[in-house]
Amino acid sequence: MFLVLTSAQGVSDDVVAEAIKQLADAEAPRRLSANAVEVRFRGARPNFALAGVDVNVVPAANRLKKLLIADMDSTIIPVECIDELADFAGLKAEVSEITERAMQGALDFEAAIDARVGLLAGMPETVLQQCYDERITLNPGARILVKTMNAQGAMTALVSGGFTFFTEKVAEVAGFRMNRANSLEIVDGALSGKVIRPILGREAKLESLNGLCAEQGISAEDVIAVGDGANDLMMVEAAGLGVAYKAKPALAAKADVVLNYSDLTALLALQGLAEANFA
């Protein structure tokens, strides 16, 4: 097994030394970057925390994955697109409250998306582009993560419970090879307040993972999946390496890996890829 230490603020040699003290039979550490170090070890799986550093354990076998499947909102980008759209209508607080409950797993996703989009009925279609231009950026490390996985020969997929208007643009900027999301109904240049069926939610994300595995001739063990909310639970649990990125407790409790202090290049470190391998 490998102990992997990651942090966007850097992982010092002192921190690495402190971590090694917790391991019964450790090899010499391997520095992957200023922000990541791995230590191969044998024996019992450790359970300890280090301030400001993500401490995770991954199997030594089959580390380099062949499919990256990622959520978009609050994972590849730092915001929830529907909350930002609602802000243009003066409804951000109301819509954000529904979003939060849905991501915590307290609301049915399909009902939650219908309720939120319904509040945006009549919004001019042009606001979608304005929202993208003014509010949407990539999270740190997102582009490096995706392009490096592509360079390693992996399939990269952005699968979101959000909207195709945004996933198509984010996928292109980040470098994802495919994207899938929900479609907003537009009538006479304005949002109708409806989402075109079928709605892509928790089960559909799992179906996307399984379908891509079948297309690529790989198994779920060859997949690294990353998300932040309850809507990502099924795909994260199914993946060979499921990552909770700055996630809600419902997802963090079930994921193989939890990242609270790292940027998205940590997903490369978990696979044993060093900065020299970054695209």
Image (cartoon, rainbow, N blue to C red):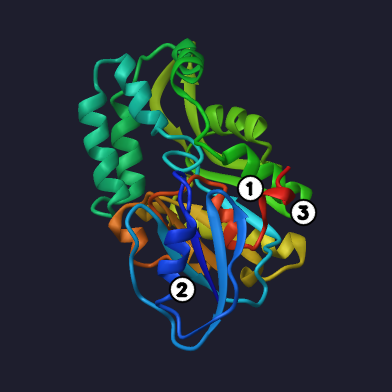
Residue shown at the point (32%, 56%) measured from the top left: 51
The percent coordinates of residue 68 (x first, y second) are 63, 54
Looking at the rendered structure, the kind of residue marked 3 is Gln
Q: Are marks 3 and 2 in contact (CB under 8 Å)?
A: no
Q: Which residue is mark 1?
A: 157
Q: Earlier in the sequence, mark 1 or mark 3?
A: 3
For the residues marked 1 and 3, what is the alpha-carbon distance in whole angstroms? 14 Å
Badge 2 marks a residue whose secondary structure is: helix
Observer able to see residue 257: no
Please name whichever residue, 28 or 171, is drawn nearer the observer in this view of the structure: 28
The numbered mark, 3 or 2, whose residue comes first in the sequence reads 2
Mark 3 highlights which residue? 152
Please say if the residues under marks 1 and 3 sit with CB atoms less than 8 Å apart: no
For the N terminus, the quadrant is: bottom right
Mark 2 and 1 residues: CB-CB less than 8 Å, in contact?
A: no
Of circles 2 and 1, the one toward us is 2
Tell me the tag on residue 20: 2
Please name which of the two marks, 3 or 2, marks the residue nearer to the observer: 2
User: Viewed as shown, does residue 168 lie left or right of 110?
Assistant: right
Q: Residue furthest bottom?
A: 43
Q: Which residue is pictured at 41% across the width and 40% down the height?
A: 74
The image shows residue 251, relative to residue 83, as above or below, that is below
Local crowd size for mark 1, using a 10 Å CA cut-off: few (<14), some (14–19), many (≥20): many
Mark 3 crowdedness (10 Å alpha carbons): few <14, some 14-19, many ≥20: some
Say if 238 sits above or below 180 in the image.
below
Q: Amino acid at mark 1?
A: Ala
Q: How far across and how far down the image is residue 234, in percent?
A: 45, 63
Please state the horizontal and vertical placement of residue 107, each as a whole percent of the image.
26, 50
- The CA span between labels 3 and 2 is 30 Å
Q: Secondary structure at mark 3?
A: loop
